[in-house]
Image (tube, rainbow, N blue to C red):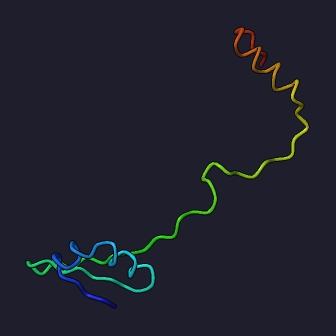
Amino acid sequence: MKVYTYSEARQKLSAVLDMARSEKVIIKRRGGETFTILFKKPMKISPFDVPGIKTSVTTNDILDAIRDSRSGRAEP
């Protein structure tokens, strides 16, 4: 664990962030407040990458449903 003053952390921000990748880093302010820098690994997958589902619906069924919804004659 490495502790920096606010001024030190500001002057060496790039190095402080690099260090936070491998160990806990604390920054202390003059008033006694302390802050911990936490490294968060980037997500490797998109939040929009969702698994598909099996269905018997065909592409034509989907296109028909879209056409029906746009024409206002949706069936119950």
Marks counted in the figure total: 0
Which residue is rendered at x = 71% and y = 16% of the image?
69
The quarter of the image holding the N terminus is bottom left
Q: Is residue 20 left or right of residue 35?
A: right
Which residue is rendered at x = 89% and y = 31% of the image?
58
- Quarter residue 16 falls in: bottom left
Where's residue 22, x and y in %?
45, 84
- Quarter residue 19 falls in: bottom left
Q: Residue furthest bottom?
A: 1
- Vertical side of 73 occupied by 53: above or below: below
- Vertical side of 23 occupied by 67: above or below: above
Where's residue 47, x and y in %?
60, 53
In depth, the one of 13 and 44 nearer the eye is: 13
- Quarter residue 35 falls in: bottom left
Where's residue 34, x and y in %?
21, 79
In depth, the one of 3 and 15 nearer the eye is: 15
The quarter of the image holding the C terminus is top right
Q: Is residue 10 left or right of residue 21?
A: left
Q: Is residue 13 left or right of residue 65?
A: left
In depth, the one of 52 and 24 nearer the eye is: 24
Which residue is rendered at x = 26% and y = 76% of the image?
12
Q: Is residue 9 left or right of residue 55?
A: left
- Vertical side of 15 occupied by 57: above or below: above
